Image (spheres, grey):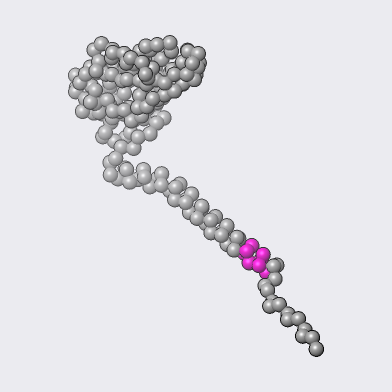
Amino acid sequence: MSESPQTPPTRPSSARARLGLQQANVAMVGKLAVITALMFGFGYAMVPMYRHICAALGINVLSLGDRQIPGATSSIQPNTQVDRSRTITIEFDANARGPWDFKPAVRSVQVHPGELMTVMYEFRNRQERPMAAQAIPSYAPKQATSHFNKMECFCFAEHTLKPGESKSWPVTFVIDPKLPKDVATITLSYTFFEVGGKVPAAPKGSV
């Protein structure tokens, strides 16, 4: 007498498994959507919160755009860190020691001590080969050096330009309100040289 084959154990249906997986995916997407919305709301609220905190503590919040000059932008902040009783003339100079064009977008601007200012410098590689170059800043008069605070400057890094490539670079600065009272004009000069070559001497009368 032959034995009847054993019935294999019952397994969950594939449809039920797929349904469970879909429900888990939907729940995960919902959680991610909530987290994304919370992160967006937090980031949006950070700006007014930051401004209120800075205003309460008397911290200078630097921003751009209130008064614009072609090739330069600035913002006078409504706090005591900007000395509106003084106006300083900032002159810009560029020394191109090689086959390239290098110049400031504007030759001079007038700023108040403590006022943020951004000025653009323009450069073009006239060679038929790429070049690596960097700029060296100098100041006149010498006593203004420690009071000329650059927040952003193309002189902080080395730059590589393709043949014929043109670039515009910003220099963002603030003049320290502690600048000596007898200084009414500051000249910011840049010497742009090719890295790997002989570094040219700084312009006469600067450091």
User: For the point 23% across and 21% down, which residue is it?
Assistant: 144
Residue 21 covered by magenta stretch: yes
Which image quadrant is residue 143 in? top left
Which percent across, then down, holds residue 15?
Answer: 70, 67
> As drawn, is 23 to the left or to the right of 199?
right
Asked whether residue 14 appears in the rendered view, the answer is yes
Q: Taking 149 as reference, is 47 above or below it?
A: below
Extreme residue toward the right, this view: 1
Give the position of the N terminus as an image quadrant.
Answer: bottom right
Determine whether, in the image, residue 122 is placed left or right of residue 205. Answer: right
25 relative position to 197: left or right: right
Q: Nearer the viewer, residue 50 or 162?
A: 162
Q: Please identify the quadrant where the C terminus is shown.
A: top left
**Image location (x, y in percent) of residue 153:** 36, 26
Per the rendered image, the range of residues in magenta is 16-23
Q: Determine the image quadrant of residue 57.
A: top left
User: Residue shown at 29%/40% (left/top)?
Assistant: 59
Residue lying at 68% horizontally and 74% vertically, measured from the top left: 11
Left-right relation of 149 to 120: left
Residue 90 in sight from this viewpoint = no
